[in-house]
């Protein structure tokens, strides 16, 4: 890659409309219905599922967003794309497409899922919500799945459509305290990790789930097009004032999800990687009689090639900049600075299985220098993932 491009970022900006003619790009650059809340902060947007999501807001630095989600509660409007799969054969289709047994997901529960191609390469992932016995929402990461559902639904009694649902996340150690206050009615007991429920907030019916992309305690809110978004959004911000809850952008997720080892579709895995290569063997149920990719995964190498990496004093550049004895041996897939660990953190994919945790490497960094780094297991800490389950509530001191 040209060095000028390597150190350049691109973003979309919000401008006042000129005239009243329709803008056809609203189909491929759709704005979250609550994006108007971001406009006072000179937002810069990127695309996620053809939806605009903020890369930066000028009222907070990346580090301030990080500490807000680690120590309090934050609000972020996302580009997640829920697709609805419903009908008598909905479970049959999803069992055909995904690698895990959908029959084990009960109504009112969520499940992490991903789909593979016939050769075992990965397509996309997301969180599946089972709203009823024959009705699901798959909140997918950035990428394509809709056509894959359609292609594998031949002969099945199933409906696949985009319900035009939008997702926002409320995350951080005070997020459930905020939920208790913001609800119109009773708290949806027990609302355990990866539960979902239908509730009312500001007299608007919404679905919430105990999930998120920060590995912090948190929940997500799924908003259908018929609700009064302005009323709901105003209520979230008003109640949030008592919690010092800021509106945040992508950086609030980046460091936390890397520290937690939460993989990003298209960055940390793609069509060239199997679930085994990226450490997701535990999410492949080969006992299922059939799913797309099963035959290939039966004989695929089972070695994990994906690890965390701690970088001394800088942030690793994305790409094949990892070296041992001058030889390039791996790729940096995701990278940022961790204010908590006070070092660069990254998710990397190595060329050889023997290049695992505790391997010392050199890596190209954003200061255009090479820095020493060491491979490690993920998560970087909270090995049992007790934080998002509410079992580890120690709030770190800001450094």
Image (cartoon, helix red, strand yellow):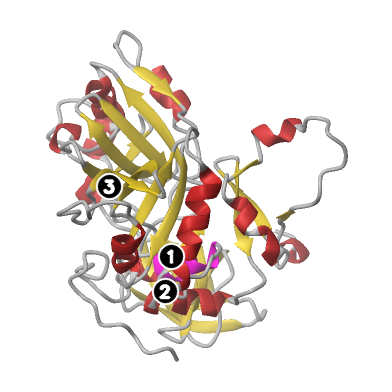
Q: How many marks?
A: 3
Q: Secondary structure at mark 2?
A: loop
Q: Quadrant of the C terminus?
A: bottom left
Crowding near pointer 2: few (<14 within 10 Å), some, many (20+)? some
Residue placed under numbered mark 1 in the picture: 239
Q: Which residue has dot 3 on it? A: 301
In the rendered structure, the answer to whether residue 330 lies left or right of residue 119 reads right
Q: Is residue 337 above or below residue 205?
A: below
3 or 1: tag closer to the N-terminus: 1
Q: Which residue is mark 2?
A: 243
Is 140 located above or below residue 218 in the figure? above
Q: Nearer the viewer, mark 2 or mark 3?
A: 2
- In the rendered image, the vertical position of residue 96 relative to residue 323, given as above or below: above
| Residue at the extreme right | 19
Q: Position of residue 356 (x, y in %)?
A: 32, 69
Membership of 112 in magenta stretch = no
| Closest to the observer, 183 or 27 | 183
- The reply to whether discs 1 and 2 touch (Cβ–Cβ < 8 Å) is yes
Q: Quadrant of residue 218?
A: bottom left
| Mark 3 closeness class: few <14, some 14–19, many ≥20 residues within 10 Å | few
Q: What is the distance, in whole Å, between disc 1 and disc 2 at their CAs?
A: 7 Å
Q: Is residue 32 left or right of residue 341?
A: right
Secondary structure beneath label 3: loop
Q: Residue at x 39, y 24 (%)?
A: 149
Picture coordinates of residue 362, whole percent (x, y): 50, 79
Q: CA distance from mark 2 to mark 3?
A: 49 Å
Per the rendered image, the range of residues in magenta is 250-258
CB atoms of marks 3 and 1 within 8 Å: no
The residue positioned 71% from the left and 68% from the top of the image is 7
Q: Residues within 10 Å of mark 1 (few under 14, many from 20)?
A: some
């Amino acid at each position: 890659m040209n060095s000028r491009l390597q150190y350049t970022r691109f973003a979309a900006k919000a401008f006042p409309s000129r005239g009243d003619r329709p803008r056809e790009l609203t189909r491929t650059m759709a704005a979250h219905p609550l994006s108007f809340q971001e406009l006072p902060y000179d937002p810069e947007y990127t695309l996620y599922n053809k939806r605009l999501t903020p890369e930066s807001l000028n009222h907070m630095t990346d580090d301030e967003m990080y500490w807000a989600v680690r120590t309090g509660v934050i609000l972020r409007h996302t580009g997640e794309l829920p697709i609805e799969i419903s009908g008598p054969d909905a479970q049959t289709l999803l069992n055909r497409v995904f690698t895990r047994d959908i029959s084990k997901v009960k109504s009112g529960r969520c499940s992490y899922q991903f789909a593979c191609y016939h050769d075992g390469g990965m397509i996309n992932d997301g969180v599946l919500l089972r709203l009823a016995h024959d009705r699901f929402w798959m909140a997918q990461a950035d990428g394509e799945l809709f056509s894959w559902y359609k292609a594998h639904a031949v002969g099945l009694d199933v409906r696949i459509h985009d319900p035009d649902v939008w997702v926002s996340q409320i995350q951080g150690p005070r997020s459930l305290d905020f939920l208790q206050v913001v609800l119109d009615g009773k708290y949806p007991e027990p609302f355990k990790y990866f539960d979902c429920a239908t509730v009312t907030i500001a007299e608007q019916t919404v679905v919430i789930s105990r999930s998120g992309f920060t590995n912090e305690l948190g929940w997500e809110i799924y908003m259908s097009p018929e609700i009064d978004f302005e009323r709901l959004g105003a209520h979230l911000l008003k109640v949030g004032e008592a919690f010092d809850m800021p509106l945040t952008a992508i950086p609030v997720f980046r460091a936390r999800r890397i520290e937690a080892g939460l993989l990003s579709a298209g960055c940390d895995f793609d069509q060239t990687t199997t679930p085994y290569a990226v450490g997701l063997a535990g999410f492949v149920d080969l006992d299922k009689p059939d799913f797309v990719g099963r035959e290939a995964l039966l004989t695929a190498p089972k070695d994990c090639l994906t690890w965390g990496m701690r970088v001394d004093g800088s942030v690793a550049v994305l790409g094949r900049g990892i070296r041992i004895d001058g030889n390039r041996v791996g790729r940096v897939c995701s990278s940022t600075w961790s204010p908590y660990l006070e070092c660069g953190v990254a998710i990397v994919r190595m060329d050889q299985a023997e290049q695992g945790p505790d391997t010392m490497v050199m890596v190209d960094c954003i200061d255009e220098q090479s820095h020493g780094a060491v491979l490690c297991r993920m998560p970087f800490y909270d090995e049992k993932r007790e934080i998002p389950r509410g079992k580890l509530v120690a709030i770190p001191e800001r450094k």
